[in-house]
Structures are given as C-alpha cells and as structure tokens.
Image (cartoon, grey):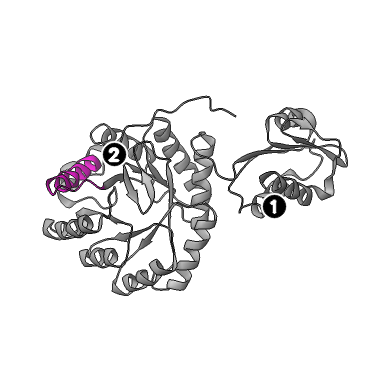
Amino acid sequence: MKPCKIITRRKSNRIYVGKVPIGDNAPISVQSMTNTKTENFLETIKQILDLKKVGVDIVRVSIPNLESVESFKKIRKETNIPLIADIHFDYRLALKAMEYGADCLRINPGNIGNQKRISEIINVAKDKNIPIRIGVNSGSLEKDILNKYRTPTPDALVESAIRHIEYFDSLNFDKFKVSVKASNVFLAIESYEKLAQKITQPLHIGITEAGGLRSGTVKSSIGISYLLLKGIGDTIRISLAANPIEEVKVAYDILKTLSIRSRGINFIACPTCSRQEFDVINTVNQLEKKLEDISTPIDVSIIGCIVNGIGEAKLATLGLTGGYKKSTLYKNGIRQKNKIKNDEIIEQMEIQIRKLIK
C-alpha cells in the first residue's frame, strides 16, 4: 500500500558506522544497546547475535571499566555487526575501544573531562576514520549550563550540543552525529526541532529512559513519530526497560507504520469481539513468535469475522476472514477455494506465509 503522506527528510551530512550509512537520505537505521554485563563477553555476544536476527543495524555496548574494554576486544572479534562503544568519564576507555575495533563512539563530552582529553579521542578517531556521536542528555548536562538555566530546557540541551559541535569543528572533525535526548517527550521534541535548524550533522533520535515495555513504547512512539513526520532523524533507538529485542521490534513497527521502512510481517488484526470465529489474539501472538525470522515485508490480515475481514483480506498480501468452523483465505486479494479449519489456522497460516516468501 502506498503511504498517504510523503515525508521530506531534513538535509544532513553522510557518515558511516561500519558499512551502515547515516544521514543524507540514507535509510533510517535501527539501533539497540546490550544490557548484559560487558565483562561477560559470551552472554553479550549472544545478545548481539539475537539482536541481529530481528534486524538491528547497529549495536551499542557500554564500556564502564578496563575489564569491559578488554571483553569488548573479544566481542568485536566474534561479531560482524557495527558496534558503538559507549564511553563516559574515562577517555582512556575510548582510546582502547577504538584500538580494539569500535565502529563508532558514543561520548558525552560534558563528562569526559577537559578539551585536551577530547582532542586526544578525536585525533585517534581521525586516524582510524571512526565517527563519534555527541550524546547530550537532560540528566547529565554540564554544571555551568544547569546553573544558567536552573533546569534542563530545550535551549540548555541545544547549547550543550552546540558547544561540543563547535569544538569538534575547531579540530576539523566532521564525522559525527548528535543527539539531545530527554525522558520528557516534549522536552526531547523541542530540543531536536531547535537543533535541527542549526546544524547539518545527522541526528540520532530517541526518548531516553522512556520506561517499561508498555509505557516506554507509548512515549517513544509519540516522540519519535512526531520527529520523523517532521523529517527529523537519521537513526533511532527505542530506550526500554525491557529485553533489547523489543526495542528493535518497536522501532520497526514505528518505521513500518509511517511507511518509512519495512521489515518482516505487518499483521493487521482485529481487536476481537463476540463475533470472532476463532481466537484471534492467540493466533496473532503465536504467528508473530513463529515468524520472527522473516525479514521480507508483507501484509497479513487476521480478522475474526466477515464484518471487516473480507475488505482487509483483499488489501493484504495474505488475508484470513473468520467463518464458522472454517475460515476463508485470500492471496493477493483473490479468494481461495480451500478453506482453513479454525483449529488448524496457526499451522496452516505459517505454511502459507513461508510459501509466499520463498
């Protein structure tokens, strides 16, 4: 189905994280972050591979100490997806991470220390052609900026970002992207809108520390969707207090809903009522789990009765309309002669979907 709205992207420069292009109308990349102890490199590697299975483009790994940076070296050798080293406070960890093969750094210059330390990081980044994300966060603004504004405001976040951008510019370093994240949706939105008018660097967008799976998804969906519809955003991360795999799924659901980027199956399903002829909720939940490995974008409608079932089925690649004991299958809008027994729907729909993508 064609999108109802064509989104005009904000013009931005192009950088690369590994082989993933960011900015200048490149596909909006999906990021997530491991929540394992980085020192436990086997567990972290497993989580990165699990994230890759559900379509993540870039993974960020926290490096809080020397032990974790040594683990990062092993993680880098065992994975082939672009990795961002997340560094705070200790600039030496950033230097080590770049030595060990980080594809990008995420630093908050406000807590790295003096400009000499930042310049050391940039010199190595230049030499190794490694981009950096300037990550400004409402929860960790510089003391002088907080003293000036008294509380995190859009102007405070933007001033912090511009300060670091100007320093990067003074060192002739232009391979960077910027974020101005906040847990408050309105604060984040206004900060990104203000910053987008002032710079041409790619923007990494997200609502930081958004909350648990449900509330975090709602907050992130509102904030990120608003920005994307404005053409703001080149790469995204959904910050959830949940399994990072859920972050990737939510990110793709947002991009899919906005007709920006599709991956996997778009299930159209009714919210159910007493007219349903089979258990729609269980059917959709089971099919989502069984078909997570599919990356081909297709629309599949699962509707429990004929009220909206026929219309939705005709619009989908594959559609099922609930009927008494047996339900009707549609392929590319055409009704199929053979019906599916309602107690075999999950098994048969999985077969039909996998046949379509071969």
Question: Which type of secondary structure does the marked residue at label 1 adopt?
Answer: helix
Task: Name the magenta segment's main secondary structure.
Answer: helix
Give the x, y percent position of residue 273: 75, 37
* Label placed on residue 286: 1
Is residue 46 something one can see in this rendering? yes
Residue stretch rendered in magenta on the structure: 156-175
Residue type highlighted by circle 1: Gln
- Residue 168 in the magenta stretch? The answer is yes
Identify the residue at the far front of this view: 358
Is residue 243 something one can see in this rendering? no
Tell me: residue 80, above or below residue 140.
below
Disc 2 marks which residue?
13
Give the x, y percent position of residue 189: 35, 36
Count of marks placed on residues: 2
* Label placed on residue 42: none
As drawn, is 117 to the left or to the right of 108? Answer: left
Q: How many neighbours does mark 1 have within 10 angstroms: few (below 14), some (14-19), or many (20 or more)?
A: some
